[in-house]
Image (cartoon, rainbow, N blue to C red):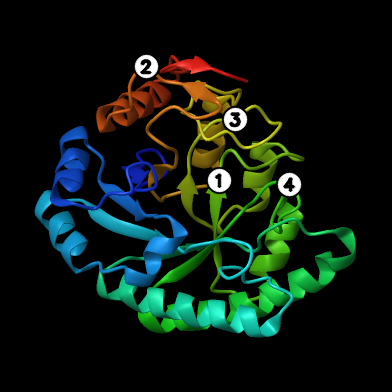
């Protein structure tokens, strides 16, 4: 990989599928990297043996796993230390499975929400303690933990908070979600995090709240953003993270195909703003 030719990637969050046909579809569309991302309840029974085999057959790399998240259990900043410990135990079990499947990166949310002002400092301490433990466990298994920037009252909502989280352990990296920043420009954030970004979650939005629509369906200035990614030397995959069908933010005439992501990315690389693939509702 180089900073001018990122391989195309796609999260499994949209299809929730990891059957052989999914990997064949990825390969046919030129998508070479997958992030394993499922509904939280599906991780307890996660088995990556078959997906690993299908990926190898198709020439697709199982690149990352998005660790599950919710407020009460999968929350590394939980103020109840016993619940936080149980979450970490489950995360370590998933890291072992990911390692055996050849996955390189584990994406983790630094918190849930809402977090009020009085609890923010304690939540940050809890998150950093958890991240130190995760970094240690992942390092022993050959993975890197990538902390995702989050919106609203979550931890990691701007560069200063993300750098504080990463300060918990020098081995920590970050996952840059392009549609989560609400108080800072994307370019300024990237400049501050240069050298600490391991992977991306690519989608578009309106700078008001996350929308998870295709590039070109929101307001991001993509030529500027891609130029900044090149400038800071980002070398991971260009990995999309959004659903395939209609949502409360977009009405699609038909679900997105894997080829639609390839066409969208090709337009971005040409310096174009891709045309929307549906009716934008914001």
Residue pictured at 14% horizontal, 56% vertical: 54
2 or 4: tag closer to the N-terminus = 4
Q: Nearer the viewer, mark 3 or mark 2?
A: 2
Q: Which residue is mark 2?
A: 253
Q: Please say if 67 is above or below 241.
A: below
Residue pictured at 59% horizontal, 38% vertical: 179
- Distance from the alpha carbon under mark 3 to that under mark 2: 20 Å
Residue 181 location in percent, x, y? 67, 41
Q: Please say if 47 is above or below 211.
A: below
Q: Nearer the viewer, mark 1 or mark 3?
A: 3
**How many C-alpha atoms fall within 10 Å of the one at disc 4: few (<14), some, or many (≥20)?**
some
Taking 98 as reference, is 39 left or right? right
- Distance from the alpha carbon under mark 2 to that under mark 4: 31 Å
1 or 3: tag closer to the N-terminus = 1
- Identify the disc placed on residue 205: 3
Name the one closer to the observer, 188 or 9. Answer: 9
Q: Quadrant of residue 76?
A: bottom right
Q: Which residue is mark 1?
A: 177
Residue 265 location in percent, x, y? 37, 29
Q: Please say if 21 is above or below 220.
A: below
Residue 214 location in percent, x, y? 46, 28
Taking 248 as reference, is 27 left or right? left
Q: Quadrant of residue 189?
A: top right
Name the one closer to the observer, 103 or 109. Answer: 109
Q: Nearer the viewer, mark 2 or mark 1?
A: 2
- Distance from the alpha carbon under mark 3 to that under mark 4: 14 Å
Helix, strand or loop at mark 3: loop
- Identify the disc placed on residue 152: 4
């Amino acid at each position: 990989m180089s900073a001018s030719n990122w391989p195309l990637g796609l999260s499994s969050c949209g299809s929730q599928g990891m059957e052989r046909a999914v990997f064949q579809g990825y390969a046919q569309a030129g998508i070479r990297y997958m992030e394993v991302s499922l509904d939280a309840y599906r991780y307890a029974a996660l088995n990556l043996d078959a997906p690993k085999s299908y990926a190898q057959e198709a020439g697709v790399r199982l690149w990352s796993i998005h660790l599950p998240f919710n407020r009460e259990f999968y929350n590394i900043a939980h103020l109840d230390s016993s619940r936080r410990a149980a979450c970490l135990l489950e995360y370590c079990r998933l890291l072992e499975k990911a390692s055996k499947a050849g996955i390189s990166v584990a994406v983790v949310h630094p918190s849930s929400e809402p977090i009020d002002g009085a609890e923010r400092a304690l939540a940050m301490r809890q998150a950093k303690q958890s991240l130190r433990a995760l970094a240690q466990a992942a390092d022993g298994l050959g993975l890197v933990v990538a902390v995702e920037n989050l919106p609203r009252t979550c931890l990691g909502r701007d560069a200063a908070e993300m750098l504080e989280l990463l300060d918990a352990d020098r081995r920590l990296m970050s996952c840059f979600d392009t549609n989560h920043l609400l108080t800072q420009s994307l370019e300024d954030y990237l400049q501050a995090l240069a050298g600490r970004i391991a992977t991306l979650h690519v989608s578009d939005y309106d700078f008001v709240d996350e929308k998870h629509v295709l590039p070109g369906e929101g307001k991001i200035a993509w030529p500027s953003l891609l130029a900044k990614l090149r400038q800071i030397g980002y070398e991971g995959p260009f990995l999309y993270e959004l659903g395939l069908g209609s949502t409360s933010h977009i009405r699609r005439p038909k679900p997105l195909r894997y080829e639609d992501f390839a066409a969208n990315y090709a337009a971005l690389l040409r310096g174009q703003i891709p045309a929307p693939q549906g009716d934008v509702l914001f």
